[in-house]
Image (tube, rainbow, N blue to C red):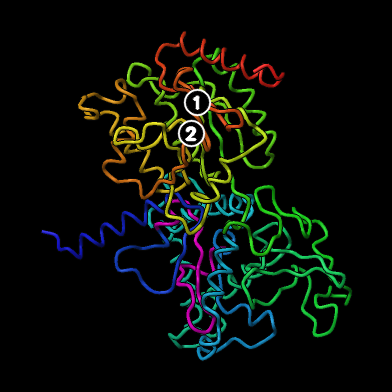
Amino acid sequence: MMSIADCARLGMKKQARELWAHAETGLVLPGDGGYELRLYSMLNKAAVPVFFNHRGVSFPKLPFTALLPWSKFAIFWDSGQSRRVLGEANDGAHLLRHVDKVGAAYQLLLQLALMDPQVIEKKRRKLLRYAPSLSWETPRCPGTLRKSALDHLGAELAHRLTRFLQTSSGLIHWLDWYWKVADDHLENSQSEDLTGTGCPLGYPICQRHEGGNICVSTWRGTPFACPIGCEVSEVPPLCQTPTGAACNLPAHPRHPCGEYPHQNHPAEVPYPDHIVRRPRVALITWSDRPQVSRMTLPALERFCEEHPGRYELIVEQAPILDSSTFVAAWNKIAFMRRVLLTRLHDAVLWIDDDVLITAPTRDPIFEGLKKSILRLHSDHFIYASKDVRHDERVPMNTGILGLRNGRQALKFLEEMFRIAREVVVLDEQAFVPRYEGWWDQDAAAEWVRRHGLKWAYLEEHRTIQSLVRDWETMKWQPGDFAAHFSGIRNEAVRMKLMQQFQHRQVLEVKGGW
């Protein structure tokens, strides 16, 4: 029988692997984990490892440091690097107490948040190339030139034997220090441009000055650094080229100094709403009702055009799910899951095909996302709206549904599919949501009954959608952001209502309503 401690370790191991499977990077802290070989699990999940150490106090524990180009597929962060930028010594454990540990952690997190997607892609390609050489298994393909860990071990033992024959000592010679300590990789990483602005690690924001460009972080008291290719000077200009001129480097960066990648915010300090860069939000929609989408899709497209850079509109063309197993409405869950798995976006936003945006120049959705699932310190990972009816069966309306990318969102979608196959009892009725009841809406209600609403941020009704089900009970009013024609099972009735609504909108514009 397993002890409670063993169960806890297994739970932590499973949770860690789930996190790395859906992460771009993984943090490798000093020390040994009692339940997980963190580095190897990260590499198996294609998460770029980020080593956090303090030079002179701790070093990354890496296999085959001299034989593998670790800095090409990993990131090395020295928490005392700011001292080197100022030209101070940093070679003793006693200096650790002088380092701003909170500031160092903030610098690293800001740098990771501002990483250029091209850099992540490049490092992952290198990771996929070199990580298999850490396996103890021999290559399966005959004649392959790819080396295994056994090959590297043989090379390292041969080198040690050669050094022993030269020195008659089993101790590591100082010339072989790089075989055990990743000093060279740490140096390479400190001068690496991860943002595409020409700035070194930890100082991702390039600022233009009359005396030349400098690179900064946003943590108070953090010193500046010089763009890659320039050096700090004690006299103006503070950053100089090797010839002594003011630093205007980099000459040809991916993003010129003062300009940032498309997905990033402009250089505002502090960043607005606790968001360190412009979020990458995928806005997804799909329709199997051409008459409905012909009325609503143009308004959705105009909405995205009115707010450039905020959303990547994805109009799905074909269903994923088998219609004999799930009703068409369930494809929204499958579409959202597919986009989340690509890990190209910070959040996904679904909008039903029967949602007609009536005020496209406004964007209350983005304002709500900034308050909830896009805030780094927020526990919310679900964004939705309240319905006119707000009770156990309708805790929220899933016609507009946002999810923060991550493990929680994927587990939510997986549980929604499990609930879809179960018998659910709501309103004293029993049904299977995958083809009965209110489908994904009822599955969401069952999920809320099990987990509560603490993870969800719900807008008040009429903030991002106003229900229109008939003329007598219509809640939409002129000026509202969107009209949602939901809860109407008869498509002929829905189309007639939508056509009448659109006609009255035209009359309102002309002053006849």
Left or right of 81? Residue 425 is: left
Q: Amino acid at mark 1?
A: His
Looking at the rendering, in which quadrant would you find the N terminus?
A: bottom left
Residue 365 falls in image quadrant:
top right
Residue 235: give x, y in percent of width and height: 84, 84
Helix, strand or loop status at disc 1: strand
The residue positioned 48% from the left and 73% from the top of the image is 60
To which residue does mark 2 refer? 400
Residue at the extreme left: 1
Residue contact between numbered discs 1 and 2, judged by CB atoms under 8 Å: yes
Looking at the picture, does residue 208 appear above or below residue 327? below
Locate the C terminus by quadrant.
top right
Viewer-side label of 1, 2: 1
Percent position (x, y) of residue 154? Answer: 44, 66
* Amino acid at pointer 2: Ile
Examine the rendered structure and indicate whether residue 329 appears above or below residue 200: above
Residue on which disc 1 sits: 484
Q: Residue at x 44, y 29 (%)?
A: 332
Q: Position of residue 218 (x, y in %)?
A: 64, 68
* Comes first in the chain, label 1 or label 2: 2
Q: Main secondary structure of the magenta part?
A: loop
Front in this rendered view, residue 497 or 76: 497
